Amino acid sequence: MPAEVPAVHDGRMTRSTPVPLATLAGLLADGTRARFCLALLDGRAWTAGELARHAGVALSTASEHLSRLVAGGILAEERQGRHRYVRLAGPQVAQLIEDLAAHAAPTAHADGPAGGRPPTLRAAGAARAMAAARTCYDHLAGRLGVTITDALTRHGLLSQDTGFALTADGLAWFEGGLRAALPPATGRRPLARGCLDWTERRHHLAGTAGAVLCATLLERGWVARIGSGRALRVTPPGHQALAGLLGLDDLIHMPG
Amino acid sequence: MPAEVPAVHDGRMTRSTPVPLATLAGLLADGTRARFCLALLDGRAWTAGELARHAGVALSTASEHLSRLVAGGILAEERQGRHRYVRLAGPQVAQLIEDLAAHAAPTAHADGPAGGRPPTLRAAGAARAMAAARTCYDHLAGRLGVTITDALTRHGLLSQDTGFALTADGLAWFEGGLRAALPPATGRRPLARGCLDWTERRHHLAGTAGAVLCATLLERGWVARIGSGRALRVTPPGHQALAGLLGLDDLIHMPG
DNA sequence: GGGAGGCTTCGGTGCCGGCCGAAGTACCGG
DNA sequence: CCGGTACTTCGGCCGGCACCGAAGCCTCCC
């Protein structure tokens, strides 16, 4: 091929110029910082100490990492007394991290044949619970998330064949069926978007509508958090409500 | 130095366990590798030598970087004789890099007051051309991309208020108006999705429909690449065609 | 006010990885 | 076959950064 690169020979870059993309990626390129961000995908605010313990590093180390993440716009901090609460800076950052995590998972098995550690029983149980139902920042994920998304699609409330959008019926369902107010589409954040589920490898509902749905279910006690993590379980009233609203009778038979 | 790695204390994690997210991010966390990826966002295949020259590093350095990016699933390689052609592994990777770049751009000005280098005239011209019209992997971006996306929306061919999806009229427009066949929605890739434009800070049309649109315009000579980069210009027949198809008469007055 | 808890700052250490040039390998053309 | 071209592999150098413990700061509580 033409190896000459005619006029664009000038497009050469000096090695020293910083690349914003690399700077941002660098923030997530450390194991400890990545663990912080993944933990914070539960959408809540953690203290520095909690994160340090979670990741198994000294408090001083965690503190420095948090400062860098805040400075880089990944996290937002809120100081209350002697606590430093920290959370993801917003839905867009959460989406970015989810996307990265979704892309990273498939390549996890590619490193070597002897790479797989046998997980502990505890860890296996936690993983099963996460796969069954969890939050993904502010919306539902796991089998529950995609099951609900599928049901919405089946009932013509959500259209996925030419993109990803609520239908007119879907809007009506939120207001009249679920009885939850959808805030008007606010500039930056779409009402509905697909978020790639990294356990199911399918899309589940995200965006404002996904957040409203998740908040509503939590608020009414239809789903509840298991322990302090991201994992969820559907409560008995939740089963009843979802059966009535979306015809999800088979939810009970979901293992997990 | 004594630093014994603590045992897995409940939800606590050992420092040594690798985090896939961090591994993936690490691939993009280097300036040179990031430059490679950004260059490859033009959707075409580059040789190792071209990329080395583009980034201003030795060939040996580039070679090692490419091997890592390929091993990590970011790039796909194709060896032809003594050439090693390399391209982005697919639309999903391209989207990921675009998203990261879009998030990284806003923080670019945050480092310092004296940070801004006065760009050369050449570079300024190239940047203006890129801002006016460019490809974003396999679809249109820049002012041209969002202008077309807006026109599609205005004509009711694309719906953005409850998500991001082509309407029935939009489907008909592709087939009957543009006369370009849309492949059936193939599992993984949506027909239409919004891609955040990092110069316009708005969404433009991506997904299969975006790719078909871009390919069609290039194929018919309605837009043409400027030099060997991602920048595009609208040709005279292109102006005429876009005016007829979408009522874009004012395209001529777009500076750039 | 004293003490305890949560966090930050500061030196210091060690490792990881990006870089190069030189030597080696594969492919192409004459 | 021989030279040139495109790329890869190998040492070796060097900077950056993740980590820790200790000391300091701030805030809350008794």
Image: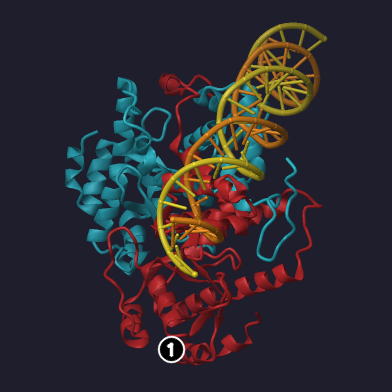
Chain colours: A red, B cyan, C orange, D yellow
* Chain at numbered mark 1: A
Q: Residue A23, relative to residue B210: is it above or below?
A: above
* Viewer-closest of A17 and B207: A17
* Viewer-closest of D29 and A242: D29
Where is residue B78 drawn, in percent x and y? 64, 37
Where is residue B65 drawn, in percent x and y? 62, 33
Q: Label 1 sits on what residue type?
A: Leu
In the rendered structure, the answer to whether residue B8 lies left or right of residue A212 reads right
Q: Secondary structure at mark 1?
A: helix
The residue positioned 37% from the left and 64% from the top of the image is B165
Q: Residue B154, relative to residue B140: is it above or below?
A: below
Residue wearing tag 1:
A245
Quarter holding the C terminus of chain B? top left
Within the image, what quadrant is residue B124 found in? top left
Where is residue A120 drawn, in percent x and y? 76, 67
The residue positioned 38% from the left and 35% from the top of the image is B111
Within the image, what quadrant is residue B191 found in? bottom left
Where is residue B85 drawn, in percent x and y? 60, 33
